[in-house]
Amino acid sequence: MGGPKNRNRGRKERKEREEEKPMENTPQKGSGGSAKPDSTDLTGQFANAYTNLTTGLHEEALAGHLQREELCLSFMKARQDFEFDAAKRATEAYQNYVKSVNEAAQQEKAQQLAQEAYQDYAATVQGLQEDTSRRTQAAYDELVTKSSEFAAESKQKVRQHYVGYVKSIQQMWTNLDPESLVA
């Protein structure tokens, strides 16, 4: 897959193409100086409308893919950060446990103190696992919520593309001069 430079270049090229596109359903000057669409190029108008539809749908699909990709990468990074933080804190807890066991070895109740130090360590590790699990679940829930929102937005944009297509076809038929079709 292309990196950010390729994505930005693709977006820039699409934007330039959009700026170069002639406006849909722009009336052309016919004979007599009145603005009428060229009904003899009906095939070209249909092709242009269809091309605009497919281009819009393709761009929407690409945008949706990029949004989902960014969401997933964000989730994976958050999850990795949670796990790294938990591992770091577990290592610190283990070092504290070892230190406590070494200090307990010098005292009368060494076995009992070592047992308490281990229980503290085990409780800390369990708490870290629960915290990491809770934070990961919250990040996942956010991922699902945002994905659903993006899907709803995308569905609406796709609908708008189809409505625009149907309207442009409708406009072509409305502007059609039947006399121009008969030789």
Image (tube, rainbow, N blue to C red):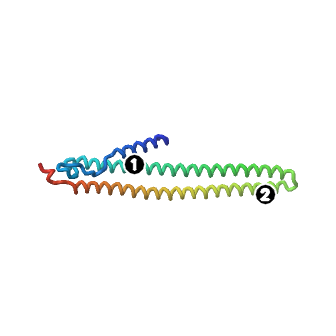
In the displayed structure image, the side of residue 30 where residue 64 appears, left or right: right
Which corner quadrant of the image does residue 108 belong to? Answer: bottom right
Mark 1 secondary-structure assignment: helix
In the displayed structure image, the side of residue 32 where residue 21 appears, left or right: right
- Amino acid at the residue labelled 2: Glu
Q: Position of residue 95 (x, y in %)?
A: 75, 49
**Residue placed furthest toward the front:** 33
Classify mark 1: residues with Cα within 10 Å, few (<14), some (14-19) or many (20+). Answer: some
The structure residue drawn at horizontal position 55% and vertical position 56%, both measured from the top left corner, is: 140
Mark 2 secondary-structure assignment: helix
Pick whichever, 2 or 180, lies toward us: 180
Relative to 141, say whether 9 is above or below.
Answer: above
The structure residue drawn at horizontal position 46% and vertical position 40%, both measured from the top left corner, is: 6
Which corner quadrant of the image does residue 178 belong to? Answer: bottom left
Q: How far apart are marks 2 and 1 (CA)?
A: 61 Å
Please tell me whether mark 2 or mark 1 is closer to you in this view: 1
**Residue placed furthest toward the left:** 183
- Amino acid at the residue labelled 1: Glu
The structure residue drawn at horizontal position 73% and vertical position 54%, both measured from the top left corner, is: 121
Number of the label disc, if any, that sits on residue 136:
none
In the displayed structure image, the side of residue 170 where residue 6 appears, left or right: right
The structure residue drawn at horizontal position 87% and vertical position 51%, both measured from the top left corner, is: 106
Classify mark 2: residues with Cα within 10 Å, few (<14), some (14-19) or many (20+). Answer: some
In the displayed structure image, the side of residue 33 where residue 6 appears, left or right: right
Pick whichever, 55 or 174, lies toward us: 174
Label 2 belongs to which residue? 116
Q: Position of residue 33 (x, y in %)?
A: 20, 50
Number of the label disc, if any, that sits on residue 59:
1
Q: Position of residue 126 (x, y in %)?
A: 68, 56
Q: Where is residue 124 in the image (x, y as percent from the top left)?
A: 71, 56
| N-terminal-most mark, 2 or 1 | 1
